[in-house]
Image (tube, rainbow, N blue to C red):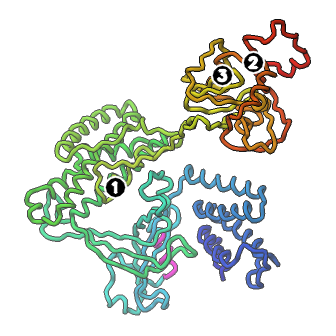
Amino acid sequence: YLYKLRDLHLEGENYTEAAYTLLLHSRLLKWSDDMCSPQFEFHGSQTQRQLKETLYDTIIDYFDKGKMWEEAITLCKELAEQYENEIFDYELLSKRLEKQAKFYENIMKILRPKPDYFAVGYYGQGYPPFLRNKVFIHRGKEYERREDFQNQLMSQFPSSVRLNTTTMPGEDIKNSPLQYIQCFTVQPVLEIPPRLKNKPVPDQIINFYKSNYVQRFHYSRPVRKGPVDPNNEFVSMWIERTTFTTVYKLPGILRWFEATDIKHTTLSPLENAIETMESTNEKILTMINQYQADWSLPINPLSMLLNGIVDPAVMGGFAKYEKAFFTDEYTQQHSEDRDKLLRLKDLIAWQIPLLGGGISLHGKRVTDDLRPFHERMEECFKQLKKKVEKEYGVRELPDLDERKSTRPRSMLRSFRQSIISISSLQGSECGTPTKSHADRDIPESPNSWSSTLPRSSGSVSVSIDEESVVTVGDAEVKLRKSKKKKKRSSMIFITEERDRTSTLDCKRLSKKQEFRSDTNLSEPNNENVPLTHANSRSLPAITGLSLSVAGGAEDVDAATAKAKRDSKTMSASGTSDRTADRRSKGVINLLFKSKSSRSEDPKPSDPAKDSDNHF
């Protein structure tokens, strides 16, 4: 039966519904290598994993044709998890990720028309039991008008009578032996997913949830109550609202679901004014975002929207709300509406910066022939802004140029929640947080030697905060923090001064260990591992440090003999067992020449030996 329903959907090009239908079959299968049961077989004998993967590929194609890329991405992620962690097929994984990336791109770049939803009531005893006296919510197709949908519906029931009212029929019609059809448009109620709440979400993502994954629908009908003011209709305009809740969310395996819960509520004129102001602010915000994203759009819709609010001659703004509700008479008669009045004033105050952003954008897009019209609109806005800020306070949005980022962003969408939500708007900011990358700080301890810097042959990797002195034989090697910008190579200075009184703590390093450190050799089974742990094989550079030799030094043999008598060594930050006799290219070999020789006529050095200690 699932596949019969799938075929019916494909004949009507209902690809989204066909995908949801096949998804019911896939949920009966597991990601296992067990053979499928006979009733689950689809294309011959297969394992459950093979059949589920085949179904997922088909379902993803259907979702793609139906422009339900959010659902397709969910299935792509599940397949990617199997390819990466279960069957380890990286070639299939790469292809799946490429397809998934294309779906993300489609979400942001391709226009998806919002389908209309229609409430259809079947009244009378002439209908079969599954339709009799029930209301269904139908999901229309792209750009399908109510008239076209209603004509197609009437063709299925040629003997039915169309009801032209939107109120619920009485018992006489419900008990009539005839067939009656009632059809009218309803508005889906947005249900934002928890992961998107109170976050600066792009309009392309939010717009999808305005007409998908919806289960509640509103129909609002204006009614007049009390005395009617011919000069201000808003005083007596009440709203009767009917809320329909379907048994399942739309879209689904069918293009319609039964409305199992129907509620009726009434909105006061003030509550209606608040909803209208919220809708107007949202409309301004959406239009500004659209014109910022696409500069090829015609300017006329934006011109009409802004001029209808700021021009007092049009009287399309909130002036009538002020005359109807912001009076002493209304405040005295409706003391319980104090919070609602504050809410309405707050919405009016927040409309000013939105209008300012829209007029600023309009000035950049307007043509020369419409320049006088724009200048008049600017003049009207200045007067309106002065009046509103004086009476309701100032609301400010941050400078748009200061909120640029590397990814496309809507102009004011990070303030969407603070502008159109029911909560207070005072002092609200919802900017997108940016990640700050911390600089590489030098470790606090002077004994902390870093080996995580970029590799560079011919240098030693150390990181020291405080100034310290290392003794090599009779020579002192001073490590001090450089105030200059970090460089990739260390600096070696050999000075002629000898001042040991300036050192606080002198630590002795054996010449043998110093030599092994410079040549990147290690001693096995040595508890105190010297600088070899700090030096990587390619000896990364000392960043931000200067290495100086303060004082003279003995020759290599004398220094080595003296270092063997020393009991103190300077250890690195950790222990490491490296393979002996490993050498790195470009190793620095320091040759410390002594100032005073023990013999007046030193023997000439052997060139073969000198080549090993070449600087």
Q: Which residue is mark 1?
A: 420
Disc on res. 30: none
Q: CA distance from mark 3 to mark 2?
A: 11 Å
Q: Residues within 10 Å of mark 1 (few under 14, many from 20)?
A: many
Q: Is residue 451 visible?
A: no
* Prevalent SS, magenta region: helix
Q: Residue at x 19, y 54 (%)?
A: 320
In percent of width and height, residue 262 lies at 37, 79
Q: What kind of element bears circle 1?
A: helix
Q: Residue furthest top?
A: 601
Q: What is the three-letter code of the residue carrying label 3?
A: Glu
Q: Is residue 13 magenta?
A: no
Instruction: Name the spot of residue 520 as percent of width and height, x first.
Output: 78, 33
Q: In the rendered structure, which amino acid carries the disc numbered 1?
A: Ile
Give whichever of 412, 182 is nearer the camera: 412
Q: Quadrant of the N terminus?
A: bottom right
Q: Residue at x 23, y 56 (%)?
A: 344
Stretch of the chain drawn in magenta: 149-157
Q: Position of residue 244 (x, y in %)?
A: 39, 76
Quarter occupied by residue 182: bottom left
Q: Earlier in the sequence, mark 3 or mark 1?
A: 1
Residue occupied by mark 2: 554
Looking at the image, is mark 1 or mark 2 earlier in the sequence? 1
